[in-house]
């Protein structure tokens, strides 16, 4: 395994359990939002590359999540279920279907 691959694995390891727990409905969308933002914004192991772009896209999706349906007034606003679907796609891209 190359140094770059090791660094990418270290970066991804922070996200794997969180995304998996959310996709498997073990945690709420609100909890996922809070934890994902905290991890992503404090992640000192981020590495440029396709894996980071996938995580960054999920970060943008988390930013579009609006928990209160009454406040969803933009086509970009996501419900908890829509965010869970995006997280599932992200998980599949990063870690396979497992």
Image (spheres, helix red, strand yellow):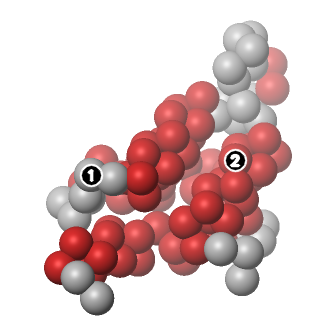
Q: Give the image location of residue 89, x and y in percent.
A: 70, 55
Asked which secondary structure carries label 2, the reply is: helix
Q: Nearer the viewer, residue 70 or 62?
A: 62
Within-10-Å neighbours for mark 2: few <14, some 14–19, many 20+? some
Rendering quarter of residue 9: bottom left
Within-10-Å neighbours for mark 1: few <14, some 14–19, many 20+? few
- Most extreme residue toward the front is 2
- Most extreme residue toward the top is 73
Task: Give the residue at x 71% y 59%.
Answer: 88
Asked which secondary structure carries label 1, the reply is: loop
Task: Give the residue at x 77% y 50%.
Answer: 85
Cα distance between the residues tagged 1 and 2: 21 Å
Q: Is residue 64 left or right of residue 79?
A: left
Q: Which residue is mark 1?
A: 48
Q: Nearer the viewer, residue 79 or 10?
A: 10
Q: Nearer the viewer, residue 29 or 91?
A: 91
- Asked if one can make out residue 14 in the rendered structure from this viewpoint, the answer is no
Q: Is residue 61 left or right of residue 46?
A: right
Q: Which residue is mark 2?
A: 86
Task: Give the residue at x 22% y 64%.
Answer: 45
Q: Nearer the viewer, residue 20 or 68?
A: 20
Task: Give the residue at x 75% y 14%.
Answer: 75
Label 1 with label 2: CB-CB less than 8 Å: no
Q: Quadrant of the N terminus?
A: bottom left
Of the residues under marks 1 and 2, which one precedes in the sequence? 1
Q: Is residue 38 left or right of residue 77?
A: left
Q: Give the image location of residue 19, x and y in percent.
A: 59, 65
């Amino acid at each position: 395994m190359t140094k770059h691959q090791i660094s990418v694995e270290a970066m991804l390891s922070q996200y794997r359990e969180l995304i998996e727990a959310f996709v498997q409905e073990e945690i709420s969308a609100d909890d996922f939002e809070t934890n994902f933002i905290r991890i992503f914004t404090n992640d000192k192991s981020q590495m440029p590359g396709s894996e980071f772009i996938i995580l960054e896209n999920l970060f943008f999706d988390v930013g579009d999540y609006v928990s209160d349906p009454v406040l969803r007034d933009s086509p970009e606003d996501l419900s908890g279920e829509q965010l869970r679907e995006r997280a599932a796609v992200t998980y599949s891209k990063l870690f396979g279907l497992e």
